[in-house]
Amino acid sequence: MQITTEQRSQIEASIRDKYRKVASSAAGLFRYPTGQAGLDGQGYAPQWLKHLPPAVRECFCGVGNPFSMGLPAKGQAVLDVGCGCGVDTLVAAGLVGETGRAVGVEMSTDMLATARLNAQAAGAENVEFAEGSAERLPFEGASFDLLISSGVYNLVIDKQAALTEAFRVLKPGGSIQIADQMLTGPAPMSPGDAVASWFT
Ligand SMILES: C[S@@+](CC[C@H](N)C(=O)[O-])C[C@H]1O[C@@H](n2cnc3c(N)ncnc32)[C@H](O)[C@@H]1O
């Protein structure tokens, strides 16, 4: 779908605006359970979460569980695209252990600030967060063994560019485990309708 520069700015502004609010609290801002209720409903194992204080878990607003498709191995490098406040990044950091690393990338500076505070609260040292877009990942090629993401690619404007980037930053033989939402009804009739309904 072709959208104008103005429409792109409109979508990006609406994403930043929504996640500025979510960075303080996700409660009541989504149509699905968030926080601990979301983690329980999506089958996150208690042992993956034991290093995360309750306030960190409450930020979670993922739509599905990328770890349900397989767990990263000790020592691996994991990238969490659209990491939000970093819950999945911190779960990955715990799973890969001290010899591995987990990196979260996020376009909202507000979510990124919360993610960095959450990493401190969790005492995680093998975690980094970077500002950037899924459409243009700020990493060298072949940097990661596993790319995870939850609830992000449905918001990305240029999905083809984002998937090209995902494959670029993966090492040969690396894996992608994405949880996301899909439109099952009729698609919007025009780019204008699509922009207006980006969050519905
Ligand atoms: C539904 S939240 C999920 C956050 C996190 N993955 C989680 O599970 O809690 C979607 C996140 O994607 C981010 N996002 C949206 N478009 C993005 C893009 N093009 N590049 C990077 N992050 C993006 C938003 O800022 C938001 O933090």
Image (cartoon, rainbow, N blue to C red):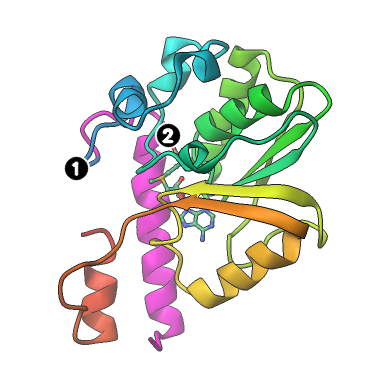
The residues colored magenta run 1-29
In-front residue for pair 20/164: 164
State the residue at coordinates (58%, 69%): 163
Residue 146, given in percent of the width and then of the height, sits at 67, 47
* Alpha carbon distance from label 2 to label 1: 17 Å
> Against 35, is 50 above or below?
above
Q: Residues within 10 Å of mark 1 (few under 14, many from 20)?
A: few
Q: Which dot marks residue 23? A: 2
Regarding mark 1 in the picture, which secondary structure is present there? Answer: loop
Amino acid type, label 1? Arg
Residue 130, given in percent of the width and then of the height, sits at 68, 45
In-front residue for pair 60/92: 92
In-front residue for pair 113/166: 166
Q: Is mark 1 within 8 Å of ligand 1?
A: no
Q: Residues within 10 Å of mark 2 (few under 14, many from 20)?
A: some
State the residue at coordinates (51%, 48%): 149
Q: Is residue 68 left or right of residue 36?
A: right
User: Where, by quadrant of the figure, is residue 1 drawn?
Assistant: bottom left
Which quadrant holds the C terminus? bottom left
Q: Which callout, 2 or 1, points at the residue further toward the start of the chain?
A: 2
Q: Which dot marks residue 149? A: none
Residue projecting furthest to the left: 185
Residue 61, given in percent of the width and then of the height, sits at 37, 36
User: Where, by quadrant of the figure, is residue 187 drawn?
Assistant: bottom left
Residue 103, given in percent of the width and then of the height, sits at 69, 40
Nearer to us of marks 2 and 1 is: 1
Q: Is residue 78 left or right of residue 158?
A: right
Regarding mark 2 in the picture, which secondary structure is present there? Answer: loop
Q: Which dot marks residue 31? A: 1
Q: Main secondary structure of the magenta part?
A: helix
Amino acid type, label 2? Ala
Q: Is residue 130 magenta?
A: no
